[in-house]
Amino acid sequence: MYKKSIYGLTIEELQDWMVEHGQKKYRAEQVWDWIYSKRTTSFYDMKNVNKEAIELLDNHFDISTLNQQIKQESKDGTVKFLFQLKDGNIIETVLMRQHYGLSVCVTTQVGCNIGCSFCASGILRKNRDLDSGEIVEQIMQVQRHLDGVGKDERVTHVVVMGIGEPLDNFENLVKFLRVINHPKAFGIGARHITVSTSGIVPKIYEFADLDLRVNLAVSLHAPNNELRSQIMKINRAFPIEKLFDAIKYYLSKKNRRITFEYILLDDVNDHVEEAEQLSALLKDISKLAYVNLIPYNPVSEHIQYKRSKKENILRFYDTLKKNGINCVIRQELGTDIDAACGQLRSKQLKKAN
């Protein structure tokens, strides 16, 4: 039986747990200081915590559930980590150096059931959800890497865009967000956290009703149902009309900008016609819509797709701008390592088999 990660508890849950096990409530704050501020790797290093509490913690929780298998470092500063979980499954986490800070892309599931036809992370179906502690610990592992570099740097931004569909692991996602946002944990501001979804409509409504003020990104990738259903099978369950009803509800509750992710696939969804359709789709919400145009990272398992030609990317961008849609062509990072999400994991699983 694997012990759960200590990182999976909110401060309130740890306080309750301490009291239930005969300890003082303030012990929780001491433990949080050791694991998040001092970043200890052993309960037995907690000098101001009594022996009984330390033994209780050690008997019930694990302080390290991820084992680093591979660390790839790009010349642009991107670092991709391959972690092995206690049950032998492997996941990816990515550190990206952006002009606005240090951003970490985390994984929420082992594999993915959404099955987008161009995506490396969905090649292998979902094995299981990650628990909240396993997601939080990805941030901690990256922070320890930064500590080792010795530049007094810290993780400033988080994007939940790694392997898996975050809203398909809703409860663990929400607990993760509450932990990393807490000022006595990582203290990452809600405006510096972005959750991406392929469009699980009921969960978008639920997400909108939370008291969290984190950002939402929607993986759209096509402006009409026929094309989107071809490349994203989730559109068959939640077509664009239902998806945009949920998006408009979210905007009415949060009044926060939504990012629309759009991977450009050569001669598939990168024509001026699709750019015009996308502009029309976003017209009513254009003040709160932002399109992130993403050059495609080819994946060997999806040979039917190729990266859009540069001139087509620029033409698509220009069409959106002409129509008053805020957009950007995403800066490419990690192109000299396994750049596509899930690519490193897929490669290692192939070797193992």
Image (spheres, rainbow, N blue to C red):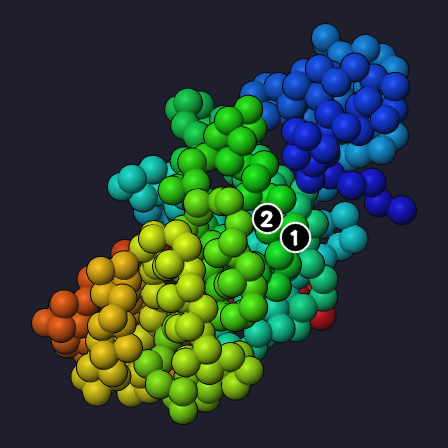
Between residue 30 and residue 340, name the one nearer to us: 30
Q: Residue at 52% across / 86% down in the picture?
A: 236
Q: Is residue 248 above or below residue 72?
A: below
Q: Is residue 252 above or below residue 36?
A: below
Q: Which residue is mark 1?
A: 171
Q: Residue at 22% across / 72% down in the picture?
A: 283
Q: Are marks 2 and 1 in contact (CB under 8 Å)?
A: yes
- The numbered dot on residue 289 is none
In the rendered structure, the answer to whether residue 236 lies left or right of residue 330 reads: right
Q: Is residue 308 above or below residue 225?
A: above
Q: Which residue is mark 2?
A: 174
Q: Is residue 142 above or below residue 293?
A: above
Given the image, on which type of amino acid does mark 2 rest? Val
Instruction: State which quadrant residue 220 falls in.
Output: bottom left
In the rendered structure, the answer to whether residue 155 lies left or right of residue 280 reads: right
Residue furthest to the top in view is 48
- Residue 100 placed where, x, y %? 29, 39
Badge 2: residue crowd in 10 Å (few <14, some 14–19, many ≥20):
some
Badge 1: residue crowd in 10 Å (few <14, some 14–19, many ≥20):
few
